[in-house]
Image: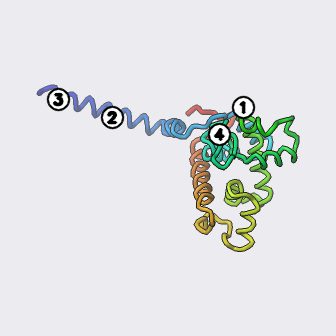
């Protein structure tokens, strides 16, 4: 019977230590919960095409959860889930040093490079508007322009509910969520061409 209070005190002390460590190292815990894979590849392509690397990481998280050889039920391929026809079109727009559609669906670096180029192109088409760019990445730029022209949707985050495609609404919300999380956890930690994971 005398041991029970001592055990309680020991357990309480241990609990306080664990809580203190979690509080002090919350960014470290956060980066364990929201990891980023292929950091060097993301940074290299993002730097080359002048796109936010954390945005690319957020898109990858939602598209494939960092699976380099992912294939969707609709036929989208690779880590950034680009449709083969779109990948073929992208390859004709710039010099990709002989990359192929097949490589974009199999290799993380190739998929990230094509996907990042495409994000930059969509940002150009939609004048840098993040929400419209993300909607276009999911639904296609032609469809988003149609929504905007017909005033089906005004292109703002506050009115995502007006997007006719439920998948696109959900997609934009998820990418914005992960982008915000990554900015909280990784922003300012880019050095020497990679995202520094040190707490």
Query: Would you say the residues marked 3 and 1 are in contact, meaning their CB atoms lie under 8 Å apart?
Result: no
Q: Nearer the viewer, residue 135 or 120?
A: 135
Residue lying at 75% horizontally and 45% vertically, measured from the top left: 116
Give the labeled residue for mark 3: 4
Q: Position of residue 45 (x, y in %)?
A: 76, 39
Mark 1: few/some/many CA within 10 Å (<14, 14-19, 20+): few
Mark 1 or mark 4, earlier in chain: 4
In the picture, measured across the screen, residue 178 lies left or right of residue 48, that is left
Question: Which image quarter is the N terminus in?
Answer: top left
The span from disc 3 to disc 2 (Cα, nearest Å) is: 16 Å
Q: Position of residue 111 (x, y in %)?
A: 73, 39
Q: Nearer the viewer, residue 180 or 174?
A: 174
Residue 129 position by quadrant = bottom right
Secondary structure under tag 4 reads loop
In the picture, measured across the screen, residue 97 lies left or right of residue 79, that is right
Give the labeled residue for mark 2: 15
Give the labeled residue for mark 1: 192
The span from disc 4 to disc 2 (Cα, nearest Å) is: 41 Å
Mark 2 or mark 1, earlier in chain: 2
Query: Would you say the residues marked 3 and 2 are in contact, meaning their CB atoms lie under 8 Å apart?
Result: no
Q: Nearer the viewer, mark 1 or mark 4?
A: 4
Secondary structure under tag 1 reads loop
Give the labeled residue for mark 4: 70
Q: Nearer the viewer, mark 4 or mark 2?
A: 4
Q: Position of residue 126 (x, y in %)?
A: 76, 60
Q: Nearer the viewer, mark 3 or mark 4?
A: 4
Residue lying at 66% horizontally and 49% vertically, measured from the top left: 74
């Amino acid at each position: 019977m005398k041991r029970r209070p001592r055990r309680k005190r020991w357990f309480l002390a241990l609990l306080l230590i664990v809580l203190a460590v979690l509080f002090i190292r919350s960014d470290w815990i956060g980066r364990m919960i929201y990891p980023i894979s292929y950091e060097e590849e993301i940074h290299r392509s993002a730097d080359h095409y002048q796109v936010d690397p954390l945005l690319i990481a957020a898109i990858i998280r939602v598209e494939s959860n960092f699976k380099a050889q992912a294939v969707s039920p609709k036929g989208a391929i690779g880590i950034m889930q680009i449709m083969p026809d779109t990948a073929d079109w992208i390859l004709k727009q710039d010099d990709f040093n002989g990359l192929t559609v097949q490589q974009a669906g199999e290799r993380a670096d190739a998929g990230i490079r094509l996907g990042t180029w495409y994000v930059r192109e969509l940002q150009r088409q939609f004048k840098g508007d993040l929400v419209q760019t993300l909607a276009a990445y999911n639904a296609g730029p032609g469809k988003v322009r149609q929504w905007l022209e017909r005033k089906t949707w005004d292109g703002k985050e506050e009115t995502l509910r007006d997007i006719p495609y439920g998948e696109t609404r959900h997609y934009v919300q998820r990418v914005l969520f992960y982008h915000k999380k990554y900015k909280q956890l990784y922003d300012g930690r880019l050095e020497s061409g990679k995202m520094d994971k040190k707490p």
